[in-house]
Image (cartoon, rainbow, N blue to C red):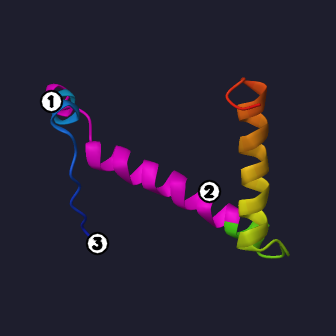
Amino acid sequence: MTNMTLAVPEDLHEIMRKHNEIKWSEIARQALWDHARKLELMDKLLAKSKLTEEDAERIGHKIKQGIAKRHGLVK
């Protein structure tokens, strides 16, 4: 197994030190696995997609415009 070093904010480190009964490396490992599985699923879903990066950006821009308009941020 490969080792990894993480930098955490001081306030998080304080909480972690107060709860030294918890195996924080296992918590981090589980979180990394969860995220990696989501990425793998996304890759599988998008493998057959015909959308280009440009298409996705255009759709995202339209969605953001609609949200801004709905909330009165633009006219």
Number of on-image labels: 3
Q: Magenta part of the protein: which range?
A: 16-42
Quote the CA–CA distance across marks 1 and 3.
Answer: 26 Å
On the rendered structure, is 63 left or right of 11? right
Q: Residue at x 44, y 48 (%)?
A: 31
Q: Residue furthest front?
A: 75
Q: Are marks 2 and 3 in contact (CB under 8 Å)?
A: no
Magenta-drawn stretch, dominant element (helix, strand or loop) = helix
> Mark 2, residues whose alpha carbon is within 10 Å: few (<14), some, or many (≥20)?
few
In this rendering, position of residue 63 left or right of residue 18: right
Q: Which mark is residue 14?
A: 1
**Magenta-colored stretch includes residue 2:** no
Between marks 1 and 3 in the image, the one whose residue lies nearer the viewer: 1
Q: Is residue 9 above or below residue 47?
A: above
* Coordinates of residue 54 in the picture (x, y in percent): 73, 70
Per the image, label 2 sits on a secondary structure element best described as: helix
Crowd rating for badge 1 (residues with CA inside 10 Å; few <14, some 14–19, many 20+): few
Point out the image quarter for the C terminus.
top right
**Is 32 positioned to the left or the right of 49 in the image?**
left
Q: Which mark is residue 2?
A: 3
